[in-house]
């Protein structure tokens, strides 16, 4: 499964993750060593490596990472398609998780509340349908047709974007300012499974503070929800380098 070992002088960019588009291999840098992985076995080998030198989840002030993902409307979207957004909220979500199902309407309300102020929401489903078939792309389309959520719903079939962002759970929110610098990451609220017991809407609070020109009181919280369902792994498995944010 490991195809070649190479000696390089410098680290590969993008947190040690890059793709050779010609050979269609994935590379992971570990100091000066690079492992070339074939596409079929990429996820399984990547998850088994010791990458303690890397920070799994994006840090505050990190830049948004580009993507090119297919949405439920049949179109592909990248960061530049949302250039007009004053604030861009990218959140990792899915179709089956009770924490997502329990809080989707709160997320909808927040998205609609700040829509006229230039806040744009983008949902990404990175879950493996081999773990939960409900998380397949076809079920994404059905869910959007039924609920008509006010955001684009993108499919991260290779899970590459979940890795790059360091998504921990569903839902996991990443809020980027006009310069696409991360200003908040974590939970949407403190009780996403049962929002009748919610005491704070962290996402709403963050957007209000930033749009009001105030300093964000709490830029980091731990996401609350189901862990991302990584391909070929047990449903409760998480990458060894993943950890709580606070």
Image (cartoon, helix red, strand yellow):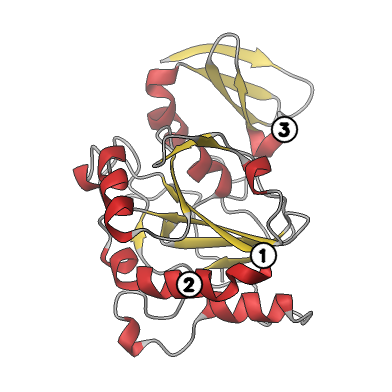
Residue 184: percent from left, percent from top: 63, 67
Residue 161: percent from left, percent from top: 52, 40
CA distance separating discs 3 and 2: 30 Å
* Quadrant (top left/top right/bottom left/bottom right) for the C terminus: bottom right
Name the residue beneath numbered marker 1: 118
Q: Residues within 10 Å of mark 1 (few under 14, many from 20)?
A: some
Name the residue beneath numbered marker 3: 13
Q: Is residue 119 left or right of residue 166?
A: right
Q: Nearer the viewer, mark 3 or mark 2?
A: 2
Q: Is residue 203 left or right of residue 231?
A: right
Q: Quadrant of residue 183?
A: bottom right
Q: Considering only order in the chain, which callout, 2 or 3, is on the residue closer to the N terminus?
A: 3
Q: Nearer the viewer, mark 2 or mark 1?
A: 1
- The residue lying furthest to the left in this view is 133
Evaluate whether residue 236 shows in this view. no
Name the residue beneath numbered marker 2: 188
């Amino acid at each position: 499964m490991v195809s070649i070992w190479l000696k390089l002088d410098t680290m590969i960019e993008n947190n040690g993750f890059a793709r050779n588009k010609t050979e269609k291999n994935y590379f992971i840098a570990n100091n000066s060593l690079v492992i070339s992985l074939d596409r079929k076995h990429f996820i399984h080998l990547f998850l088994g490596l010791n990458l303690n030198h890397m920070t799994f989840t994006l840090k505050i002030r990190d830049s948004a990472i580009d993507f090119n993902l297919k949405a439920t409307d049949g179109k592909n979207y990248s960061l530049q398609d949302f250039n007009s957004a004053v604030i861009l909220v990218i959140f990792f979500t899915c179709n089956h998780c009770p924490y997502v199902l329990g809080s989707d309407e709160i997320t909808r309300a927040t998205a609609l509340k700040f829509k006229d102020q230039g806040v744009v929401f983008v949902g990404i489903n990175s879950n493996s349908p081999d773990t939960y078939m409900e998380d397949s792309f076809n079920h994404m389309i059905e869910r959007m047709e039924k609920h008509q959520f006010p955001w684009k719903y993108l499919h991260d079939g290779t899970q590459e974007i979940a890795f790059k962002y360091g998504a921990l759970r569903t839902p996991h929110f990443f809020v980027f300012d006009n310069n696409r610098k991360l200003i908040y990451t974590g939970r949407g609220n403190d009780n996403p499974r049962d929002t009748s017991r919610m005491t704070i809407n962290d996402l709403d609070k963050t957007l209000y503070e930033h749009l009001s020109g105030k300093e964000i009181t709490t830029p980091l919280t731990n996401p609350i929800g189901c862990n991302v369902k990584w391909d070929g792994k047990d449903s409760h498995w998480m990458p060894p380098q993943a950890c709580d944010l606070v």
